C-alpha cells in the first residue's frame, strides 16, 4: 500500500512509496483505512527534529477513516465504523485518566517505540504511534474513536488534533471569561481554533497576531476583532488595554521568543496559555521578581487540556449547530501524491489546514 515516508530526521521532503505495509494487527488492535488527514505543524516539527520521533517514519496524526478489521477483544468497533484517529488514547485506569485529565495519559506513548509499518528495507515508525499519511494504519483500539455518520472525514480529521487543541485551550484550559480581552499569537489552524473558542466563551476583544497577511485576514472571518503583525502588537496592546496588557494571551507557535512576547503582553494577574509545541532545548527565561510580582498565570495546554473524548463530542455538537466553522479551516486539498506541496503550503503559511484526501 501507499504511504508517505520520511527516511531521516532533517529531510524536508517525504517519499510517497507503494511498498509499505501496516503492521502490528492483533488482539486489542484495529486496522483503519485512512480517508482524510490534516497536516499539522507538529508533523513538520517531528520531521525537523524539534519534537522527538524515531525515523524512518510515516508522519500524520490528524486523521479519520473507516475500520477495516478489529482484533480479538475489541468490542466497541466493527468493520465499516467511521473513526477519528486519536494520537493520545486514554487508558482509563492511570491516575491522570481517573482524574479526568486524559490528555496527560502516557499509555499511548508506550507504543511510540514500536514500528507501525514495514518496508522491504526494514521497520518504519508512525508519528506519535499513529502515522496517517498512509492508506492503512494499525493502532490500539483506543486510538480509534467512533464518530457519527453526519461528520465527513475531512472534518473529523481536524477534530483529531488541531481543532481540539485550539478550542480546548480557550474553553478548557483558559476558560476565557465573557467580556475579556484576548490575544492569539500564531494563527494557523490551531490559533484560529483558539480564536473560535475565545469567541464562543464571549471574549470582547480578540486580537489575532501573525506575520502572514492571509492568516490575519482569515482570523477576522473566524471571530478576531482585530488582526495585527507581530510588530504591531505593542501598539494594539496600548490602544486596546491602555498598556495594561490582555486578560489572556495564547502562544500558538511553540518558541521561547513568542512565549516571552506572550508573557509581556499579558496583563498583571492575567493568563498566558502555552499551546505551541516547542523544543526541549529552547528555554523560556523569566526572572523571579516578575514571576512573583506580576502574578501572571502560565497555563500550558496539551491537546486541549481536558478529557479528550468529551472535547471531541463538544466540537461535533458545536459544529453541527453551526457555532464553529471547521469547513473554513480547510484552505487546500491534495491527494497523498501532493503531500510535499502541502508541506510547502504549511511552511510558507499560506494554508490554515491542508486536507490530504487518501
Ligand atoms: Zn491513562
Ligand atoms: Zn497535531
Image (cartoon, rainbow, N blue to C red):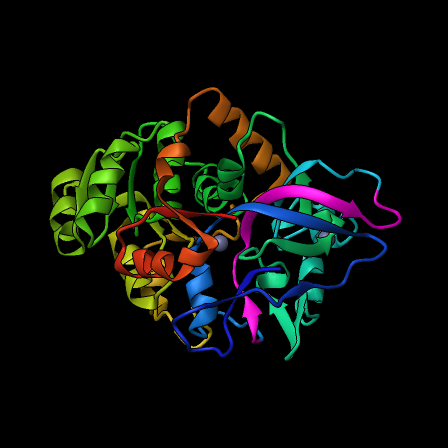
> In the image, what residue occupies the spot 26% across and 51% down?
350
Q: What residue is shown at x 34% (from left), y 38% (from top)?
A: 195
Q: Where is 76 relative to 46, above or below?
A: above
* Image x and y of residue 46, in percent: 48, 68
Q: Is residue 67 magenta?
A: yes
Q: Is residue 57 above or below residue 294?
A: below
Question: Could you tell me which residue is drawn at 19 percent across and 55 percent down?
Answer: 211
Q: Nearer the viewer, residue 233 or 116?
A: 116
Q: Nearer the viewer, residue 211 or 123?
A: 123
The x, y position of residue 321, in whole percent, is 47, 19
Q: Where residue 11 appears, x then y in whole percent? A: 41, 76
> Relative to residue 158, is residue 117 drawn left or right?
right
**Could you tell whether 122 is left or right of 326 in the image?**
right
Q: Quadrant of the N terminus?
A: bottom right
Q: Residue furthest top?
A: 321
Residue 342 visible (yes or no): yes
Residue 155 at what x, y percent from top left?
A: 49, 36
Which residue appears at 59% of the width and 53% of the height? 135
Residue 56, placed above or below residue 179: below
Residue 335 lies in the magenta stretch: no
Residue lying farthest to the right in this orientation: 72
Q: Is residue 244 visible?
A: no
The range drawn in magenta is 55-74
Amino acid at each position: 500500500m501507499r504511504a508517505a515516508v520520511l527516511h531521516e530526521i532533517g529531510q524536508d521532503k517525504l517519499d510517497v512509496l507503494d511498498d509499505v505495509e501496516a503492521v502490528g494487527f492483533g488482539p486489542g488492535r484495529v486496522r483503519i483505512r485512512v480517508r482524510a488527514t490534516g497536516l499539522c505543524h507538529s508533523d513538520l516539527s517531528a520531521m525537523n527534529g524539534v519534537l522527538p520521533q524515531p525515523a524512518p517514519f510515516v508522519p500524520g496524526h490528524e486523521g479519520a477513516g473507516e475500520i477495516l478489521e478489529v482484533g480479538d477483544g475489541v468490542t466497541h468497533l466493527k468493520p465499516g465504523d467511521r473513526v477519528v484517529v486519536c494520537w493520545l488514547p486514554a487508558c482509563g485506569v492511570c491516575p491522570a485518566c481517573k482524574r479526568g485529565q486524559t490528555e496527560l495519559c502516557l499509555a499511548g506513548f508506550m507504543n511510540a517505540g514500536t514500528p507501525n509499518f514495514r518496508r522491504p528495507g526494514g521497520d518504519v515508525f508512525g508519528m506519535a504511534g499513529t502515522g496517517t499519511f498512509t492508506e492503512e494504519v494499525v493502532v490500539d483500539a483506543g486510538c480509534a474513536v467512533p464518530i457519527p455518520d453526519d461528520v465527513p472525514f475531512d472534518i473529523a480529521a481536524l477534530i483529531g488534533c488541531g481543532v481540539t487543541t485550539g478550542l480546548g485551550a480557550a474553553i478548557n484550559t483558559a476558560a476565557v471569561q465573557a467580556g475579556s480581552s484576548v490575544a492569539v499569537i500564531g494563527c494557523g489552524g490551531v490559533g484560529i481554533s483558539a480564536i473560535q473558542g475565545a469567541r464562543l466563551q464571549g471574549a470582547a476583544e480578540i486580537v489575532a497576531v501573525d506575520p502572514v497577511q492571509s492568516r490575519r485576514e482569515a482570523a477576522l472571518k473566524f471571530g478576531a476583532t482585530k488582526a495585527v503583525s507581530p510588530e504591531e502588537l505593542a501598539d494594539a496592546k496600548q490602544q486596546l488595554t491602555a498598556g495594561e496588557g490582555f486578560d489572556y494571551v495564547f502562544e500558538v507557535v511553540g518558541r521561547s521568543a513568542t512565549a516571552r512576547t506572550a508573557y509581556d503582553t499579558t496583563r498583571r494577574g492575567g493568563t498566558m496559555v502555552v499551546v505551541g509545541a516547542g523544543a526541549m532545548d529552547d528555554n523560556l527565561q523569566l526572572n523571579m521578581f516578575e514571576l512573583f510580582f506580576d502574578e501572571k498565570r502560565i497555563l500550558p495546554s496539551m491537546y486541549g487540556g481536558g478529557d479528550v473524548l468529551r472535547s471531541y463530542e463538544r466540537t461535533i455538537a458545536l459544529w453541527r449547530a453551526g457555532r464553529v466553522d471547521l469547513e473554513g479551516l480547510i484552505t487546500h486539498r491534495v491527494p497523498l501524491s501532493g503531500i510535499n506541496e502541502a508541506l510547502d503550503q504549511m511552511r510558507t503559511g499560506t494554508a490554515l489546514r491542508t486536507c490530504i484526501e487518501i
